Image: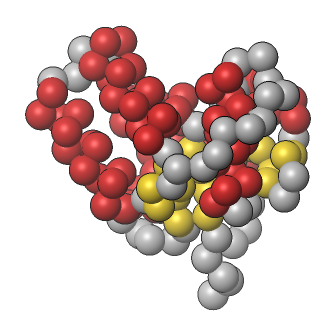
Amino acid sequence: MSKRFTIILDTNVLISAIVFKGTPEKILKSIILENKFDGAISPEILAELVKKLKFKFDFPDKLIKEWELIFKNTFKNMLPSYNTKICRDSDDNKILDLAVFSKAKYIITGDKDLLSLGKYKDTSIITPNDFLNLEF
C-alpha cells in the first residue's frame, strides 16, 4: 500500500459532503471511516463550516456539535500562520496556508479561484472528481 498523505477539503467540499453527499462524501468517508488519508483542518475552516451549516442550511445545533466532534477527532487540527495574500478571497488564502503548514499533497475544492492556481508550492489543487479518479 502506498504511503499515507494529507489532504485538505475546502469548506465547499465539506458542505457538499455533509449536505448533498455524492463524490465529496466518498472522499470524506475515505478520511473518517476508511482512514485512507489524513485530513487537515484549521479552527477558521471549522468555524466557517459551522456557520454555514447553521445559518445557510439550518442544521440543528446538536448535529453541528456532532460534526465538530468528528472533525476534531479524525482530522489533524492545525493552526497555521496566515501569511499568504495571493487570492482575492482571504478564505482561499487560509486554505493555502493550511496546505503549506500541513504539508498537504492535495487541496480538494470546487472553488474556481483556487482551481485556477493548479498548484501552490508542493500542493496540487484539484476537484473532488479529479481526486477520486487518481490511483492510490
Q: Is residue 55 above or below residue 107?
A: above
116 to the left or right of 24? right
Q: Residue at 23% across / 33% down in the picture? A: 64
Q: Residue at 54% across / 29% down in the picture? A: 12
Q: Quadrant of the N terminus?
A: bottom right
Count of labels in the image? 0
Q: Residue at 79% across / 54% down in the picture? A: 123
66 to the left or right of 44? left
Q: Is residue 132 above or below residue 3?
A: above
Asked if residue 113 shows in the view, the reply is yes
Q: Quadrant of the C terminus?
A: bottom right
73 to the left or right of 39? left
Instruction: Tell me how the rendering is colored.
Output: secondary structure
Q: Nearer the viewer, residue 123 or 33?
A: 123
Q: Is residue 105 above or below residue 114?
A: below
Q: Given the current orientation, which residue lies at the most extreme bottom position?
A: 1
Q: Residue at 69% across / 51% down in the picture? A: 99
Provide residue 28's location: percent of width, then percent of height: 46, 51
Asked if residue 26 shows in the view, the reply is no
